[in-house]
Image (spheres, rainbow, N blue to C red):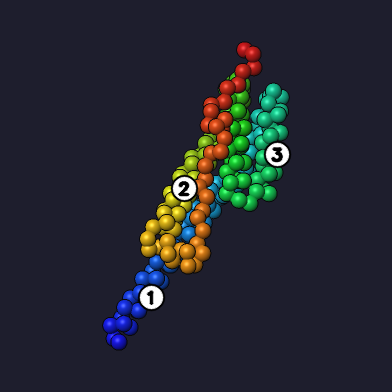
Amino acid sequence: MGTLIIILIVLVVVIIGLYNGLVQSRMKVKNAWSQIDVQLQRRFDLIPNLVEVVKQYTKHEESTLTKIAELRTSWANASTVSEKANLDNELSGALKTIMAVSESYPELKANQNFSELQEELRNTENKISYARQFYNDSVTMYNTKLQVIPTNIIAGMFNFKEEELFKVSSEEVKQNVKVDFGK
């Protein structure tokens, strides 16, 4: 009888430990996503300033500037990881175009405001890249726990669900932007 009670106590402690490990991993994933969200929002907050400076120098990229404004609006309405990832991918392509445009306008490149905004954007892009990597690492560790024994049993009992990885969905976003004004 005493042995049975000890086995039961050990089993309960193991189940609690596995459950708490899953909860901690899930919270790490949520925190990692929040960090991406914060950095993406920071980038979207920088964009209006960048767009205004670029507008002062060129009308050639009006469609790109309009697209950026539309993406910024769509960002506020996006709610899932995949929606935000897709918007992020589109925005990255548009921002590459703006940076490429700056190469064609020496007076724009020399503008102090543009230089500062470009540096802020570069720093933000680095933070976003790190946050994406951390998020995907966290999701991978969490999803792995959901699939390995014995945590998969506990995960099934308590209805833990896999999380989505943050990924680039479009091959065109991975390409370098080429801007040619017929020069």
Q: Residue at point 46% right, 57% down?
A: 28
Identified by mark 1, the residue type is Val
| Residue 175 screen position, x and y as percent | 53, 28
Quadrant for residue 179, please give it.
top right
Which residue is denoted by mark 3 in the rendering?
Answer: 70
Mark linked to residue 136: 2
Q: Amino acid at mark 3?
A: Glu
Decide if residue 111 is in sight here: no
Badge 1 local density, few (<14 within 10 Å), some, or many (20+)? few
* 167 or 88, nearer to the observer: 167
Q: Residue at x 67, y 42 (%)?
A: 72
How many numbered tags mark residues here? 3
Q: Earlier in the sequence, mark 2 or mark 3?
A: 3
Separation of disc 1 and disc 3 at Cα? 53 Å
The residue carrying mark 1 is 12
User: What residue appears at the point 57 percent right and 43 percent down from the top-left corner?
Assistant: 85
Secondary structure at numbered mark 2: helix
In 3D space, how far apart are the residues under numbered discs 2 and 3 (Cα atoms)?
A: 27 Å
**Along the horizontal axis of the image, is 82 left or right of 29?**
right
Q: Nearer the viewer, mark 2 or mark 1?
A: 1
Q: Residues within 10 Å of mark 3 (few under 14, many from 20)?
A: few
The front one of 6 and 140 is: 6
SS for callout 3: helix
The answer to whether the residues at label 1 and label 3 have Cβ atoms under 8 Å apart is no
Indicate the quadrant containing the N terminus: top left, top right, bottom left or bottom right. Answer: bottom left
Residue at disc 1, secondary structure = helix
Q: Residue 173 location, x and y as percent?
A: 56, 32
Vertical position of residue 153 compared to residue 101: above or below: below
For the point 61% across and 24% down, which residue is it?
101
